């Protein structure tokens, strides 16, 4: 009888371990993605770390603002031997968050219109983005 209880307890422990969620300690998110639609609108998303560590020789991205110029977003993404370029200037609503974007160390997603206006900016922080 004790042997049966031990096997039952062992089976219960194994089932509990298999059902437990995986821990994400040490997990980092490094992604760099951009696309442009046929009409010129598009999106870039990922992390600045992902753009910096991307395998493409010319891949980079940044949010910029100087004292006398309009703020802008710029990215270059190299795939194989081809580099595609992406940029936009923020509309009034998006520009209100530009300082946060310039100091951001997490995931970002930015959309632009046919006219090159950045109309949507998402900034997400998390421990997986902390290796900057």
Image (cartoon, grey):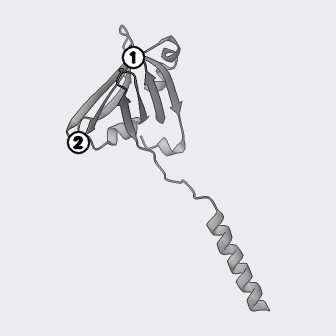
Quadrant for the N terminus, please: bottom right
Name the spot of residue 93 as percent of width and height, x first: 53, 14
Residue 60 found in image quarter: top left
Residue located 36% across and 31% down the image: 35
Residue behind mark 1: 114
**Rendered view: 17 above or below 88:** below
Name the spot of residue 33 as percent of width and height, x first: 38, 36
Q: Nearer the viewer, residue 85 or 95?
A: 85
Q: Earlier in the sequence, mark 1 or mark 2?
A: 2
At numbered mark 1, what does the secondary structure look like: helix, strand or loop?
loop
- Camera sees residue 39: yes
- Camera sees residue 104: no
Residue count near mark 1 (Cα–Cα under 10 Å), binned few <14, some 14–19, many ≥20: some
Q: Nearer the viewer, residue 61 or 120?
A: 120
**Rendered view: 115 above or below 131:** above
Residue behind mark 2: 80
Residue count near mark 2 (Cα–Cα under 10 Å), binned few <14, some 14–19, many ≥20: few
Q: Nearer the viewer, residue 15 or 23?
A: 15
Q: Is residue 32 left or right of residue 107?
A: left
Distance from label 1 to label 2 (Cα)? Answer: 26 Å
Name the spot of residue 132 as percent of width and height, x first: 41, 40
At numbered mark 2, what does the secondary structure look like: helix, strand or loop?
loop
């Amino acid at each position: 009888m004790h042997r049966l209880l031990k096997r039952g307890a062992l089976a219960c422990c194994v089932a509990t371990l298999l059902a437990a969620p995986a821990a994400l300690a040490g997990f980092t998110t490094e992604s760099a993605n951009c696309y442009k639609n046929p009409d010129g609108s598009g999106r870039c998303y990922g992390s600045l770390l992902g753009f910096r560590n991307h395998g493409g020789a010319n891949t980079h991205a940044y949010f910029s603002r100087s004292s006398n110029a309009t703020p802008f977003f710029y990215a270059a993404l190299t795939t194989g031997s081809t580099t595609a370029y992406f940029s936009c200037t923020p509309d009034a609503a998006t520009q209100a968050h530009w300082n946060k974007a310039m100091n951001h160390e997490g995931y970002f997603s930015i959309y632009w219109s046919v006219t090159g206006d950045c109309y949507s900016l998402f900034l997400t922080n998390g421990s997986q983005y902390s290796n900057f």
